[in-house]
Image (spheres, coloured by chain):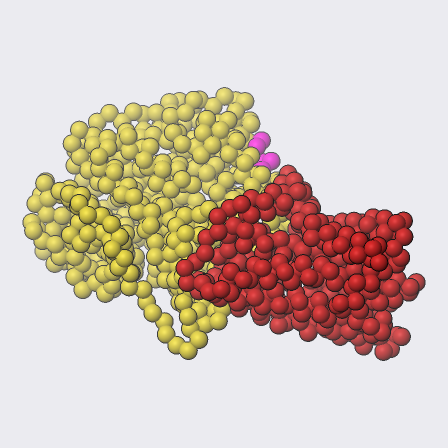
Chain colours: A red, B yellow
Amino acid sequence: MLAQIGITIAQWLVVVLGAPVLAGVIRKTKARLQGRRGAGIFQPYWDLRKLLVKEVVIAENTSWVFRLTPYVAIGTMLLSAFIVPVLTTAAELQFLGNIILLMYVFLLSTFFLALAGLDAGSSFGGMGSSREMAIAALAEPTVMIAIFAIALRAGSTGLNEMINRAASDPLLLLNPGHLLAFLSFFIVALAETGRLPVDNPSTHLELTMIHEAMILEYSGRYLALIEWASFIKLFLFLTLLGNIFFPWGVAVTLQPGAVAIGVFALVIKLGVLALGLAVLETALAKLRLFRVPELLSGSFMLALLAVISFFFLR
Amino acid sequence: MSTKDRNTVVAAINEFCWAGVELDVRSGEHEVRVTVPPAELLGFTDYLQSRFDGRPELIVAEDTRAESGGFTLRYIFELPGKDVFVIVSMLLQQGQDLFPSLATRWYLASLFEREIHDLFGLVPSDHPDLRRLPLHQFWPAGYHPLRKDAERPEVFEDDGRPFPFQHVQGEGTYQITVGPVHAGIIEPGHFRFSVDGETIVNLESRLFFLHKGIEKLFESMHVSRGVELAERVSGDSSVAHVLAYCMAVERCAGVEAPERARYLRVVLQELERLYNHIADIGAICTDTGFAIANAHAMRLREDVLRLNDRLVGHRLLRGTVVPGGVAIENFSNHQIADAINTVQKVQNDFKEVVALALDSTPVLDRLHTTGVLSKQIVCELQVVGIAARASGVDADARRDHPYAAYSKLKFQVPVFQEGDVWARMMVRVQETQESVHLIVQALEALPAGEMLQPVTTLPAGASAFGLVEGWRGPIWHWVAIGENGMLARVKIKDPSFANWPALNYAILQNIVPDFPLCNKSFNLSYAGNDL
């Protein structure tokens, strides 16, 4: 029992404390790819520390929603960090959630961010909220269908079962349904975490922003919490991609050796995915806003094909 | 050529033998000066338009009450296809504040007239839109800073009166207000979008937050001191602005820059064009989210800036052009070889960067059909420079009104028909190649001799204009000399002044997130516009 509690807390800490460095690695890789030196990979921690001690400026006409939202954002992500199997599938305390719950916890945070964007009454907040909601509405069905494609084969929507089932399939990567679902989920992950080609996380152009426009009014520790939450969200999405679709290395027991391999595997997977993301963000330009629905409907079709292929290629 | 053009224009004006329209015999080689009484202005300008398709490119007001009793207005008409300008001078009578308005004939004239209304307190009669332009609402009503006797008012604070913006109403139409403080480190400007969802149905820009009284400041300066101020009118166009200023001063003094200086002026101006165009193309790529092209463009821009530093000791080429020539140390053979090598290397690398961007489908998808500016709008608003050439107007002052050594060098003027962001980028891409070509030609053919013909006598009362094709477009300086070599009046027209309104049209029916990209493809100067 002690081991169970220990590993659950250990996983949670890996997510919560490791998330900023992942963002740092992506930024560093992008900078190197562009021929710049870039900030160190630990820069996000220093940014968070700086923001945490800075003064908070709040627009006069905001309501309690504005002040609550940062805590909802970080709270939902701290909760989600309990749900996702990061190192092992043997942590039984994770009974408390499955992937459907996870996706809607994410959505709860998005919902509150959109409300907060509207709350200050500035033009950019409203614009960001409207765009974020449009994208969330398009991404949601895709996420669900992609999840069904995997859940159908696993016979469960529990994350541990999905990973265990995938790990036991030797011909996993030869399964077209699996690969289609991966592609679909990857595109949705880009949209949900506000990466190129959907949103540009490093832009200074307020009129083109989506996620950044919603949080433009935030400062100080509130901004720190929201930034941290978005680091965690990115970490969780990449972990899900790595563990569900490439389940090798995830510990199935709580043996120290297996967990050590789990840690090692996680670092490799996240490293590869972060590198892939950085390459993608360097090679791609941002889509015209009205092309995003086309991208997401393409992703939806991939997910649908993945589900259909399950019935044919079982 | 120009003598023949000039004779045609003089003959045409002589035909127009209305009372009070007088030809000034002191006109220069490329200009015809005419004095017109206020009652005949509209008739005469209409004649210029119908006969030569003439358009007023610059309108200058001068406070000449001390000399002649009333204000003087000058209208400089460009006649397309002719290397001759008609300078129409109109003297208002003593105590007369009303003057005939050209606003309903040319939109650009209406802007100049609003400017004159604010700064001089002269009233264009029947002007359709006399809202404030350079002076914001809080400037005291009777204070017109460019009058020589203007006294600074005691109270000078914003009283919170809003600017009367146009209102677009309708179901689902709302306003987005952007600026004057922006998220990036850029100059201030206020943009008011009326949008239907994400589609822009109207854009009104409110500028002049950077109005700092440059023209007034000139009037306290000696001609030689004005050089430094002219360099700082718009930081990215230092050479172009100071060159226009110096050309105007040289014409006032009747001095010509020596041959070697003329070639060096070409080199300096093209270096400026080169680094700005490279930076702009990088910035356009950034705004599509394609950061890698920008990273390399910035590297190449830095190469050019360092070359500038090695050649003349200043990265932005300041302190180089002076009235009468150029004030730099003579280039050694080593420096010339270094310059040629560097610009050719930059050109080769730059081709790769451009290819990288133009081979990327997502980038092209963002550039094509975004922010289309029609040729009709270009002609009606008298849009100039890059924006005009990208919309099918074949005009370039370096070729049409050659100055420095441009008439002796070979170069092409790229013109595109599409009028979208892509076309404006392509004009820059091709002009970059031409600039490198011009720099190499000028350096290889650099004639020997003096670099400076000092300006010694400055006749009081003399006035002239200088016209230069800056990297954005034509830059005008009108200089009038006062007593003891002091400046009596300097009027500046940066291409941004004519082009800002065009942005309001180019962006219509585009979506809000495409505005920054469209704006960047114009990349107009706030400082040069606001003065």
Magenta-colored span: B341-346
Q: Position of residue A60 (x, y in %)?
A: 41, 59
In the image, is A97 to the left or to the right of B478?
A: right
Side of B396 where B492 appears, left or right: left
Q: Quadrant of residue A177?
A: bottom right
Side (left or right) of A174 relative to A115: right
For residue B103, above or below residue B62: below
Residue drawn at x 66%, y 42% is: A42
| Residue A224 on image: x %, y % | 57, 51
Res. B503 image quadrant: bottom left
From the viewer's perspective, is B102 left or right of B395?
left
Is residue B475 shown above or below B486? below
Residue at 62 percent of width and 68 percent of height = A108
Residue occupying the point 46% across, 41% down: B273
Image position, residue A309 (x, y; %):
83, 75
Give the mark count.
0
Pinpoint residue A62: horizontal percent, then vertical percent. Answer: 45, 63
Is there any visible trace of residue B430 in the rendered image? no
